[in-house]
Amino acid sequence: MGCHEVVQRALKAGRKLLPEHEAYGLCGEFGIPFAPARLAGNWEEARQAGEDLGFPLVLKIVSPEVVHKSDFGGVLVGITSPADLRKAYDRLLANVREKAGHVAVDGVLVQKAMPRGVEVAVGGLRDDVFGPMIMFGSGGILIEVFKDVSFRMAPFDEEEALRQIRDTKASELLAGVRGAPPCDLGTLARLIVNAGNLMCRVPELAELDFNPVLAYPDGCVVVDARMILS
Ligand code: ADP
Ligand code: MG
């Protein structure tokens, strides 16, 4: 599906928030690597998605009303068998009902579990003065605690993205601490550049949030994506 189709369909339906699986549709269009995932509307669809994707898996709630999914028990990791998946499916829906009340639920996202990596974050916003901007920084909760972020005006090239990475403390983690191998900065820089291109080429996109992006010695992958339309 063309990128504008995802966006136009959401806008036509009066939706400003692109859920994770739709955000990945846009990622695919712009060469941004993401964890394979499928939206399931019921248990049978979830079971089939699990079988097709293969274990280990992560299960996530998909709801326009739940922004920080893990705050509501809306992310379950470490699913290694069909029996685990069944339990996780029931648990996930129960968690959200208990902790978030009667929120609208679009379904569950069955997602391939990615290996542990260095967690970083890439964000995008549209500034009134500077236009599309891309943020890079430490991922997960570190971003909120340490505010370790650096901004660039999009579009920009890989060299600039590498400088942006080096502006942050995250670059020390990416270089490898305590004997850990260094992460590949080239693929990460390309991801950041492509996020900038996405912001520039999709004017309806007000904000994007990839948190975390997992970085590895041989690549990187987005495992949580959110996009907001204007
Ligand atoms: P939230 O809405 O709470 O930010 P996330 O989708 O980011 O939910 O999931 C919470 C955490 O779970 C992530 O920060 C990451 O550490 C882990 N995680 C999520 N998806 C995956 C995945 N596909 N593979 C491995 N770890 C994941
Ligand atoms: Mg997240």
Image (spheres, grey):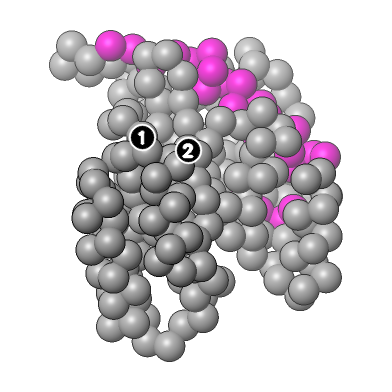
The range drawn in magenta is 181-208
Residue 207 falls within the magenta-colored stretch = yes
Q: State the residue at coordinates (23%, 63%).
A: 87
Q: Position of residue 2 (x, y in %)?
A: 81, 44
Residue furthest left in the image: 178
Q: State the residue at coordinates (31%, 24%).
A: 173
Q: Is residue 9 above or below residue 21?
A: below
Q: Position of residue 74 (x, y in %)?
A: 35, 65
Name the foreground residue: 179 vs 57. Answer: 57
Name the foreground residue: 139 vs 7. Answer: 7
Name the foreground residue: 37 vs 86. Answer: 86
Q: Is residue 66 above or below residue 207?
A: below
Q: State the residue at coordinates (77%, 73%).
A: 13
Q: State the residue at coordinates (33%, 45%).
A: 57
Callout 2 amino acid? Ala
Q: Secondary structure at mark 1?
A: loop
Task: Judge: label 1 CB < 8 Å from ligand 1.
Answer: yes
Q: Secondary structure at mark 2?
A: loop
CB-based contact (under 8 Å), mark 2 and mark 1: yes
Q: Is 29 left or right of 119, judged from the image as shown? A: right
Per the rendering, the mark at residue 35 is 2
